[in-house]
Image (cartoon, grey):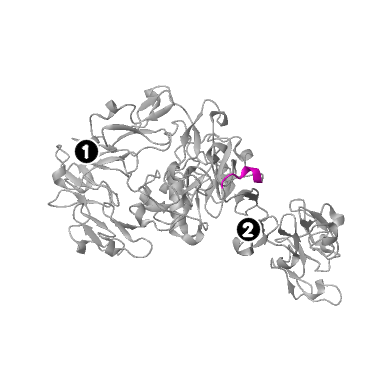
Amino acid sequence: MEHEMNHREPRVLLLAACLLALAACPDDAVTPDQATAEQGVDGAGPDQKVAGDSNPADGSTDTALPDQTPPDATQPDLAPAICDKDCLKLSKYNCAKKAKGICVECTKAEHCVKNPWSLGPKCDTKAGYCICAADADCAKWTSGKKCIGTAPVKLCGCKADGDCPAPRKCIGYFATTNMKLCAMPCKSNKDCKDAASPLCDTASGRCQACLTDKDCASGYRLGDRCLTNAKGYKSCGCKADGDCKGNPHGPTCSLGARRCTCKADSECTTAPYTMCMKPFAGAAFAHCRKPCASASDCKPPLACMIGSKKCGQCLADSHCTDSKVPYCDLATSTCVSCKSDKQCTGSKKHCVPTYGQCKQCITSKHCTTASVPFCDPQYYHCFECTEDAHCKVAGKYTWGNKCYFNMFIGKICRCESNADCAGSPMGPTCFGSLMKCSCAKDADCKTAPYSKCFLPYPGAKYKRCQKPCKVDKDCDIGSAPRCHAASGVCGACLTGAHCQHGAAPLCDTKTLGCVGCKAVKDCALSRHGRACAGAKCSCAADKDCAADTWGSKCLSKSKRCGCEKAADCAKSTLGKVCDTKNSACGCATNSDCPAGKTCTGKSSAGTKICA
């Protein structure tokens, strides 16, 4: 199966759909101003325009710094028989339709297995996109043989060329994240079919917009410098106003977008680009363009303003009838959400002047929460970090030294290898699946006061260096509220009295965690089984399932007693009916119950039982 590298459009559209209905998003989902349609279909930020977006008036192309390798020309289209026809009309990446008519990448695994652009064979039916759970799921995926990321977003990608089927190499990236994808390397310029990236960098095998500053010396370019971003992609742009001297786009360098821009018509001195206007509705910048002559010269919903010959929406506030964008930016003739901070309320208190939208921050001084102190100029949102240097501060208690972009959380400090944990107070080893620095023993903890290596909460898969506790108030009140003063370790319990959950009523004094059992005798009354394994009452065979358990069958997947059919409930004291939804014996009427009991009880899962 082939997998095209251009996953920008479907993933951003899916994420945008999720964000527009926040109730359906994961708890740690980014807010709408972090990653919605303002990013463009390729995940560009509000100061970056979509790669390949053409100007009908002059035929020029605005090119954002690319994040992914151009798609392979040989990729097959989706088979219409698999997909919803209405969704295919919207985008060939959207294969299925969810409730309320929302088009998504998938609603079942078949949409992922047969989708040549998917990044995994499993379908996250809640979010509507394709994912993976383990490396084995990615064995035949050409985007990469490694299942990378953190739940709920884990995708098939690569970490090295060895993770790619030949002749592909690990040189692509997924949208704005740090996740790498396998892609076909170029050997010469003829392999570069995308007009936005026509030059082959034979050293890396990537198609680039430029290779040296000479490639940015003429034409309608974004700047006079050939810039390389953190992922190795090159594009014409700017780093300072000096890089925009004589540039037809304008004389001012927008540092967020790294492109030359303008603020007024007077700055547009290179004919025929004499009008300073936004290239599309909602753009975070304006640049010099050709004056328009008719509506066909403008990108909808912009129209050609009679008199000004600019592509725009308004000449006065009264022309802006949409309550979401009620003000007219006279400099660009577009309707905007705000023109000053006075028009911004709630958590988005600052008006980005070139963007006309209220955002959380414009500079880091607006980020007053200690855990997210840096303002990202691309998203105008406060994050834990915006560059690796923010994570490498000596003694800073972070999960790693690398600034990683997570599409749900934003920019966070994490690790990809042990090298990213050098000097980390949490420990020297990167726990790969969670991308968190960890420790194995107290000797790994070398940064005071984090001198004890223990689980952050009972049942955690990793340990981290933490402050030793003396009293309960030194511990996390949520998951590990009890202090074992003798060892300085926090846990869930010190005695059984601290364990109130019916499924885990005992305290394991070694792990300080509440457990279901410590020995077989603890499971004498358990409905899950008469065996003790992994600190939980369970079953190893049918013989461990008594009449008072959820069924006489030891279920192979859960290793819990239950039922698959009514015969498994023939001797059950809970009822003679098998609730196949919960794999538990129960009842429908009193006649299903043994003498002395009635069908009046109910389990926590909702199964009616005899009581």
Residue 565 in picture, x, y percent from top left: 78, 59
Residue 311's mark? none
Q: How many marks?
A: 2
Question: How far apart in space, not on screen, are marks 2 and 1 (Cα)?
Answer: 68 Å
Residue 399 magenta:
no
Residue at 70% across / 62% down in the picture? 493
Residue 394 lies, in percent from the top left, at 49, 44
Q: Which residues are magenta?
A: 442-447
Give coordinates of residue 528: x percent, y percent. Answer: 78, 60
Identify the image quadrant of the N terminus: top right
Q: Please give the name of the residue rendered at 27% of the width and 26% of the height, measured from the top-left corner.
A: 214
Tell me which residue sits at (52%, 34%) in the image. Answer: 2
Give the quarter of the image for residue 428.
Answer: top right
Question: Does residue 522 appear to the left or right of 409 in the view shown?
Answer: right
In the rendered structure, the answer to whether residue 45 lies left or right of residue 437 reads left
Residue 281 visible: yes
For this view, does 218 lie left or right of residue 521? left
Q: Nearer the viewer, mark 2 or mark 1?
A: 2
Q: Is residue 175 visible?
A: no
Q: Which residue is mark 1?
A: 58
CB-based contact (under 8 Å), mark 2 and mark 1: no
**In front: 484, or 58?**
484
Viewer-nearest residue: 84 or 421 = 421
Q: Amino acid at mark 1?
A: Asp
Residue 543 falls in which quadrant of the image?
bottom right
**Mark 2 — residue?**
469
